[in-house]
Amino acid sequence: MVAAIDIGGTKIAGALVGAEDGVPLRRIQRPTPAREPGEQVFAAVAEVLAQLRGAPEWARVERVGLGSAGPVAAVRGLVSPVNIAGWRDFPLVARVSELAPGLPVVLTGDGVAMTAAEYWQGAARGHGNALCLVVSTGVGGGLVLGGELYPGPSGNAGHLGHISVDFDGEPCPCGGRGCLEGIASGTAIARWARESGWRPGAGAGAGTAADVAASARAGDPVALAAFDRAARALAAGIAATATLVELEVAVIGGGVAQSGELLFGPLRTWLRQYATLSFVRDLEIRPAQLGTDAGLVGAAAAALWSQHP
């Protein structure tokens, strides 16, 4: 088994994942204290790992797989998630290794982890050239090229969330401008909708992307426009990537993808306008199959496929 931990801007999840079947067991989840100091964030990771270590199946664990929001420096074991301000070049692998002595600890960016999961057990299975995207609190991504997971030299290849799709766009916390994440993430969808006059209905909560989706299903024009805007940005980023590396399929997962055709309908429409060359025209868009398990299954898959001894 692999002890897998998936670290995002909203939650930290853990599970023990079967190396043969990819099935997560002993699931644990804690909220990410993303606005707190780095040590407090790591304390939440340590709590999840401690819970896993207490499970009877821990005796079968041979590796620890970490999937983290990026960017990451996988070779050096460092993480600097854009949406976790307290972690800048945080030595995540070294710190986790102290809590799991004797076990190899493998770090993977969350987009690459999701890609590994969907290629191993999900919607990209059988496709040798694929892009997989996590559209949630942020936007991450990963690539399969020539039948191999391609994390790149630092582990960040396919990190589509921080390519610019609007050169007059808003500044991004990453230092860029007009980034895909700033338009298509769940956070960005909700922010744009509120700034454009949308208000959540009674009992809808704080006004999240899920609340915007509910309004869109009811026909709210601003909510529908927010999803159309996000879909257009995604289409531009996907088409550019497909043109660069020639893709067969693009798989979309994460919380925003749970909105279904509110996102996928306009995404396919916009993609037809952006992906016009003959070798990208037949690019297929698919919803991810593994849902919230993708980060955990992918962290485990990447650890299993790693050359780490």
Image (spheres, rainbow, N blue to C red):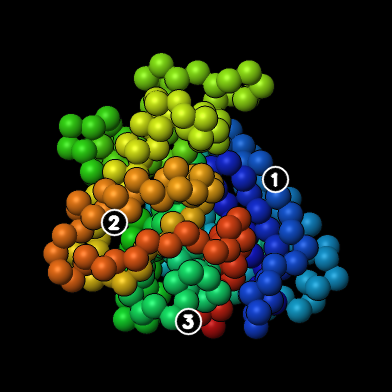
Q: Is residue 139 visible?
A: no
* Residue 130, quarter of the rendered image: bottom left
The type of residue carrying mark 1 is: Arg
What x and y, as percent, mark residue 291? 58, 58
For mark 2, what is the residue? 238
Tell me how far mark 1 sits from mark 3, CA to CA: 30 Å
Q: Earlier in the sequence, mark 1 or mark 2?
A: 1
- Discs 1, 2 touching: Cβ within 8 Å: no
For mark 1, what is the residue? 30
For mark 3, what is the residue? 307
Tell me how far mark 3 sits from mark 2, CA to CA: 29 Å
Give the crowd class for mark 3: few <14, some 14-19, many >=20 residues within 10 Å.
few
- Discs 3, 2 touching: Cβ within 8 Å: no
Which residue is at the front of the view, 84 or 144?
A: 144
The type of residue carrying mark 2 is: Ile
Which residue is at the front of the view, 40 or 170?
A: 170
- Identified at 45% across, 26% down, the residue is 220
What x and y, as percent, mark residue 149? 40, 75
Answer with left or right where residue 4 lies relative to residue 269: right
- Identified at 58% across, 41% down, the residue is 10
What x and y, as percent, mark residue 17? 68, 71
Q: Please tell me whether mark 3 or mark 2 is closer to you in this view.
A: 2
- Identified at 47% across, 76% down, the residue is 125
Image quarter in which the C terminus is found: bottom right
Q: Earlier in the sequence, mark 1 or mark 3?
A: 1
Q: Please tell me whether mark 1 or mark 3 is closer to you in this view.
A: 1
